[in-house]
Image (spheres, helix red, strand yellow):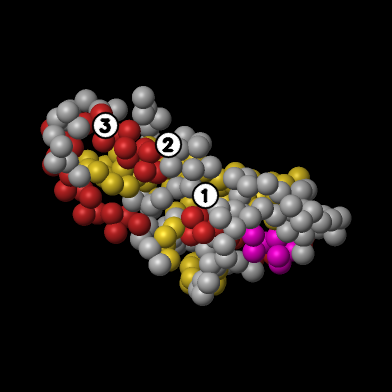
Amino acid sequence: MIKNYSEFEKGKLLLIDKPWGWTSFEVVKRIKKKIISFSKKIKIGHAGTLDPLATGLLIILTGKYTKKVDSIQNYKKTYTGIIKMGCVTPSFDSETKEYNFSSTSHITSELIQKISKKFIGEINQYPPSFSALKIEGKRFYEYARKGKKIKNMKPRRVRIYQFNILKIGIPYIKFLIECGKGTYIRSIAQDFGIKINSGAYLLSLRRERIGPFSIKNSSKELE
C-alpha cells in the first residue's frame, strides 16, 4: 500500500477496509507508524469514525488532503448489517450483553417492511450512551461504562435516504441503509426494536460506501 512516501506530504487519500475490533484511531496510528520515518511533520487523519465492532470503508487523509475531512464527512454513507430482535443491549450493539428478552411471535415480514419505511427522511435520534461524543470534557462511553446516566442528552436531526430490508430470518434482519452525516446505525437498530415492540440491537455493521468511494476499491494491507 505504501510505496512512494513523498506523496504523503503533498496529500494522499487512502481507502482502508477497517478490520473488526480496531478503532479508527488505531488504523490512523498504524499508518502513521509506517510513514513516520519519512517525515514527522506529515498530518494524518480519518474522515468518518467507524465503531470498533464495525468493519468496512474508512478514509484516511494525509498531508494537505487533511483539509478535505469536513467535505468528505458530508457525503452520504451506505451500510449493510444485521439487526437482532427480541432483546436489547446497553451499547445498542454486541459490545455488551443481551438483556430484557421479549417475544418476536407477532413479527411478520410485512410488519418489518412497514416499520423500516418509518425511518425514511429526516428523523430525530438520540446517540448511543456508548459513543465517543463528548459532554463536559468526557466521552459518553466513559460515563456509560461506570453506570452513570448522561444528563441533558439531546436528540440529533439526521437524514435517512434508504432503508432496504435485504433478508429476513426472524429474529434477524439483514438491511442496507444510506444516510447522511451524524447518523448512528446502532440508534436506528434500537429505535427499530421500540417501534416493532420487541427490542432490538445491531449485531453487525459494514460500511460499503462514502460518497463516490467504495469498499471495493479499498485495501486491507495494514501490517
Q: Nearer the viewer, residue 24 or 133?
A: 133
Q: Are marks 1 and 2 in contact (CB under 8 Å)?
A: no
- CA gap, disc 1 and disc 3: 29 Å
Q: Residue at x 32, y 33 (%)?
A: 30
Q: Are marks 1 and 3 in contact (CB under 8 Å)?
A: no
Q: Using a 10 Å C-alpha cutoff, classify the residue at mark 1 as few (fewer than 14 neighbours), some (14 to 19) or many (20 or more).
A: many
Does the segment drawn in magenta span residue 25? Answer: no
Callout 2 secondary element: strand
Q: Nearer the viewer, mark 1 or mark 3?
A: 3
Q: Which of 159 and 100 is in front in this view?
A: 100
Give x and y (percent) for residue 132: 44, 55
Q: Which of marks 3 and 2 is in front?
A: 3
Residue highlighted by disc 2: 17
Callout 1 secondary element: strand
Q: How many labels does the image show?
A: 3
Drawn side of residue 174 relative to residue 14, left or right: right
| Label 1 vs 2, first from the N-terminus | 2
Q: Which residue is drawn at 52% across and 49% down?
A: 79
Callout 3 secondary element: helix
User: Where does the magenta region start and end?
Assistant: 189-196
Whether residue 31 appears in this view of the structure is yes
Residue 41 bears which disc, if any?
none
Label 1 sits on what residue type?
Tyr
Q: Do the residues labelled 3 and 2 touch (CB within 8 Å)?
A: no
Give x and y (percent) for residue 71: 29, 59
Residue highlighted by disc 1: 79
Label 3 sits on what residue type?
Lys
Residue highlighted by disc 3: 33
